[in-house]
Amino acid sequence: MKNFAAEFRKNGVLTLLAVPALILMVLFRYLPIGGIILAFKRFSIPKGIFGSPWIGFNNFKFLFLTKDAFIITRNTLCYNVVFIVLNLICAVTLAIALNELLNKKAAKIYQTVFMAPYFLSWVAISFIAFAFLNKDGGLLNMLLRKTGAAEISWYSETAYWPLIIIIAQLWKNLGYATVMYLSSLVNIPQELYEAALVDGATKWQQICKITLPALRPMMIILTIIAIGRIFYSDFGLFYQLPRNSGPLFDVTNVIDTYVYRTLKDLNDIGMAAAANLYQSLLGFLMIMGSNAIIKKIDSDSALF
C-alpha cells in the first residue's frame, strides 16, 4: 500500500489523466461481463435477468445445430485471416515506400490521401459503393451495357462479394495501418543507413537488413492484437456495405451481424448472448495462443 501511495504521488497527474479512460473501460468493458448469465437463460423482459428461467446450454445447442454457426465462424475467421495478411504486407510496403521518398512534402500529401478513407463511415462508403453497384444506374452496369455485356445484379450475386469486401476493407484501413509503421520508421537512426551506404549496400539490402528488422516489434504487436480480434468483425463493413441484402448472407454474415440480427429480427437476447460469449471465448483463446507461440520464438517480442 505504501508503494502504491508513493507511485500515485509520483505519477498523480498522469493517473488523473487516465481516469476518464478507466471509467469508460469499467462501464463498457467490465460491468457488461455480468451479462454472460443471459447466455444460459431464456430471457424474458417482464421477469428480468434473475427471474428468467435457467436453461443451461440450450442456447448453445440451438446455435450449433443450425448451419448458421458454421457460416458465421467460417466467414469471420477467413475474412480476418485475409485482412491480417493483406494489411500487414500492404501497410509495411506502403510505409517503406513513403519513407523512401526524397520529396517529404509529396510523401505527406500521399499519406493524407491514403489516410482520408479511414475517416469515412461505412454508411457513407456504402452509398459510394451503391453508386458503382446499383443495378439500374450504377457505373459498372453502365459500362457493361456499353460493351454489350450482360448486367450484373451485384446485391444478389454472392460470387463477387468476398473480393468487394476485401478491397473495401483494405482501401479504408490501409492509411491508418501505414501511419502506425511510419511512426516506427522515424525512430531508426539515420547513421545506420549512412554506414550501410558506405559499405556499398543497395537500397533493397538496406530495407532487408535495417528497415524490416526495425519494424519487426511493431509488426508482431499489431499482428498479435489483430489475431486476438480475429473473431470480431467490422460491423459496418459486413452490414452497411452489402446493404443488409438477404441473398448475400452466405458470404457476408459474420458473428457480429448474426448477433445484431438475432436481437433485431428474432428478439432472442439469450441466443445473441450465447453467440457473443462464443465469440469472446474464441478471441481469448486466439490471443493467448498466438502470444504463447511468439513467446517461445522470441520472448522479447511477446505482448505479455
Image (cartoon, grey):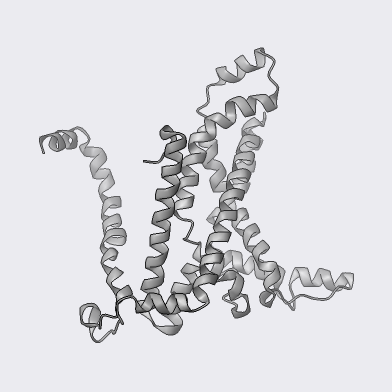
Seen as rendered, the residue at the extreme left is 2
Observer-nearest of 116 and 290: 290
Q: Could you tell me which quadrant the C terminus lies in?
A: top left
In the displayed structure, 194 sits above or below 126; it is above
At 58% from the left edge and 75% from the top edge, which residue is drawn? Answer: 249
- The number of numbered discs placed on residues in the rendered structure image is 0
**Residue at (58, 25) in percent of width and height:** 210
Residue sitting at the far bottom = 46
- Picture quadrant of residue 252: bottom right
Q: Residue at x 48, y 68 (%)?
A: 255
| Position of residue 181 measured from the top left corner of the image (x, y, whole percent) | 54, 38
- Which residue of the protein is positioned furthest toward the right in this rendering? 148
Q: Position of residue 84 (x, y in %)?
A: 56, 51
Give how far across and how far down residue 218 sits, in percent: 49, 38
- Left or right position of 42 against 237: left
Where on the picture, by quarter, is residue 38? bottom left
Which residue appears farthest toward the top when viewing the image?
198
Work out which quarter of the rendered image holds the N terminus and state it. top left
Question: Can you say whether 183 is above or below 42 in the image?
Answer: above
Q: Please tell me which residue is depicted at 42% across the width and 60% down the height of the picture.
A: 282
> Between residues 133 and 102, which one lies in front from this camera angle?
133
x and y percentages locating residue 98 in the rendered image: 63, 36
Up-down relation of residue 59 to residue 210 (above or below): below
